[in-house]
Amino acid sequence: MTKVKIAIVSDFYQEQILEFVDFFKAKASEFEFIYTGKNENFSFWNYFKTIYFVEGLDLSKYDLVVSLSSGIAHGIVTNLDTKHINFGLDSDFELFESNSVFLKIGLRNWHSVSLTRPDKNFCLAEFEKIIFDKRNRAADFKLAKIVKKHSLEKPFETDKFHLITNDLTDFSHEIVQIFNKTGKKLCIVTTEKVKNKLISNLNPEIEIQLINSYKIEASRGVILDKNFRSGFQLINLVQGNFWIFSNQNRIATDFFKNVNICESGESVEGQLSKFISKSKLELAKDNFKYQLNLDSFSF
């Protein structure tokens, strides 16, 4: 790709998507990064205000606009001479899981129609593609290529387990209680909302890290709640081939070989006990880091 004028419009903070920023900035004669503000103080009223902001952006001077969307950034309006590539990095589940009739006829319709604006749509995981295709029949999503970049660093032993969850579900609450009782080391990787709920009820062996500012580079085992459904966040969080204990999470099986699915009908505590007692879980034989193969895209 020759040097062109490029803009990135993103629902994610710049530090979360540096791989995209560095890749496109290096190929641009002129570059601009625009953050939509979508993840600031989320409410459905702010959702409408952010849509108004995004649709009003003047991007006419750019040859290529890349949207990194968590529900809104893809809705930019470009002229006929500007190429628009959208990466659907996170499906907006708050929007689609609401029972509000107002949202069904308002925001959902906007979401579906606006996804036909990009020239190309990409997502990261097979399960996400199924969701996007089902909800947005007019938009055709392709799977982005992800490569496993082998790390030169040797994996090192750790006694710490990790729980990744977006909300305090019954499953994640039970996991926390089990670790509270056993005294084993656990790091909960979650949102600010969950952190504020949990912070006063944990034993000293349990720590909390925020999803947007943490990478799991060494772990005895990763526990993944089924409510965690972002392939983009997962490849940024989990930098290594660790054992996964998953609560029926389809994203996990898209990315990992070593997945232990939590079966219904058996107690979570019993299944987790078997998982955390496995020997040498921390020694990942195939240590790698995930990396988007951006060079494979033709723009």
Image (spheres, rainbow, N blue to C red):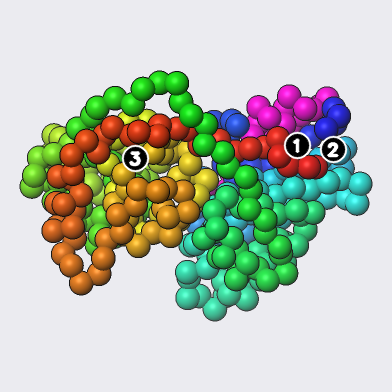
**Callout 3 amino acid:** Phe
Asked if residue 114 lies left or right of residue 68, the reply is right
| 288 relative position to 11: left or right | left
Q: Are marks 1 and 2 in contact (CB under 8 Å)?
A: yes
- Residue 272 covered by magenta stretch: no
x, y (%) of residue 94? 48, 62
Residue 290 placement, left or right of 225: right
Disc 3 packing (10 Å; few <14; some 14–19; many ≥20): many
Q: Give the mark nearest the N terminus, 3 or 2.
A: 2
Residue position marked by numbered label 3 in the rendering: 242
Q: CA distance from mark 3 to mark 2?
A: 42 Å
Q: Which mark is residue 7?
A: 1
Instruction: Say what amino acid the circle numbered 2 marks.
Output: Tyr
Q: Residue at x 16, y 64 (%)?
A: 267
Earlier-in-chain disc, 3 versus 1 = 1
Q: Quadrant of residue 12?
A: top right
Q: Mark 2 packing: few (<14 Cα in 10 Å), some, or many (20+)?
A: many
Q: Which residues are magenta?
A: 20-39
Viewport quadrant of the C terminus: top right
The disc at residue 62 is 2
Residue at 50% in and 57% down: 43
Q: Residue furthest right?
A: 81
Q: CA distance from mark 3 to mark 1?
A: 36 Å
Q: Is residue 274 visible?
A: yes
- Residue 82, how many percent across, how many down? 86, 45
Look at the image and say whether residue 31 sits in the magenta stretch.
yes
